[in-house]
Image (tube, grey):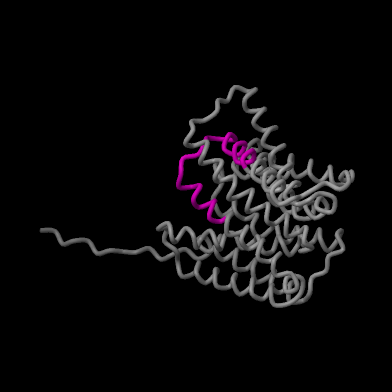
Amino acid sequence: MHFRQVLPLIGALFALYIIWGSTYFVIRIGVESWPPFMMAGVRFLSAGILLMAFLLITGHKLPRLRPLLNAALIGVLLLAVGNGFVTVAEHQNVPSGIAAVVVATVPLFTLCFSHFFGIQTRKLEWMGIAIGLAGIILLNSGGNLSGNPWGALMILVGSLSWAFGSVYGSRIELPTGMMAGAIEMLAAGLVLLTTSVLSGERMTTLPTVQGFMAVGYLAIFGSVIAINAYMYLIRNVSPAIATSYAYVNPVVAVLLGTGFGGEHLSSIEWLALGIIIMAVVLVTLGKYLLPARPVISPCEAEK
């Protein structure tokens, strides 16, 4: 592979591994001075406006109504519910590292939804799902989540929504390129800000400098750059590499949370982290590490 091809690949993987992994810690900083739905709404709306303005200035046209509405629906499922619920959970004092560990189960749920859409699932993958679910149960049995059932439930519902949206999004017509991401972020931002108003969120004081910097980082790096890096990887590398962020992100998030955020994980939570990561590796890399045996059918006898 040529150096000019390797460089964007390394940059895209860095964006997914480190930037997406760090967003959980940055959300934790942001919700200290922002109401959660409002912060998530400002993040995605500003990111969507920036990306849409760039696309329109560079000559891109708005898509037809059907793919536009489809993208808006996917934006609600992935970003408004999927990410918005994680933001609310962290506002309710769920540690950022634990939130990332629960979100790491998304590939397991994605596989379940794929099965319902008619995609064949191997026994090895079902075993990975079972191991992952055991890890979730263990994670909820003691430590940070056992005392915060609503926070745990919100992250789990958000993960299910992200997984369903990912599978459903691959089955419907969406705008091409970055236009899909721009519409998804705009739709999510509007839904989250509407939810903020309806739920009675209010700014009692102006957010801190750290709070503003957190939203800026999440909008530019966590949304515009990382999401487009993910789209680049989907088009240029195998799915196993593109989805490998799922077991790198929780490790990055846990290290940031424990190293800089003063978060503490119990021995049970460390064990659950290892089990869930092992399950996700099994599901995402199983088909490459342990390929299925080819089915050999006997040829019909010549007449």
Question: Is 83 placed above or below 212 here?
Answer: below
Looking at this view, is 299 or 129 the one in front?
Answer: 129
Does residue 64 appear left or right of residue 118 in this picture? right
Residue in view at x 62 percent, y 38 percent: 5
* Residue closer to the observer: 105 or 191: 191
Magenta segment main secondary structure: helix
The residue range painted magenta reads 163-187
Classify residue 216 as left or right of residue 56. Answer: right
Residue 178 lies in the magenta-colored region: yes
Quadrant of residue 117 within the rendered picture: bottom left
Give the side of residue 112 with respect to residue 54, left or right. Answer: left
Question: Which residue shows up at 48% across the image and 30% down it?
Answer: 64
Across and down, in percent, residue 133 comes to: 59, 71
In the displayed structure, 163 sits above or below 234; it is: below
> Quadrant of residue 213 in the image?
top right
- Measuring 41% from the left and 61% from the top, which residue is drawn there? 120
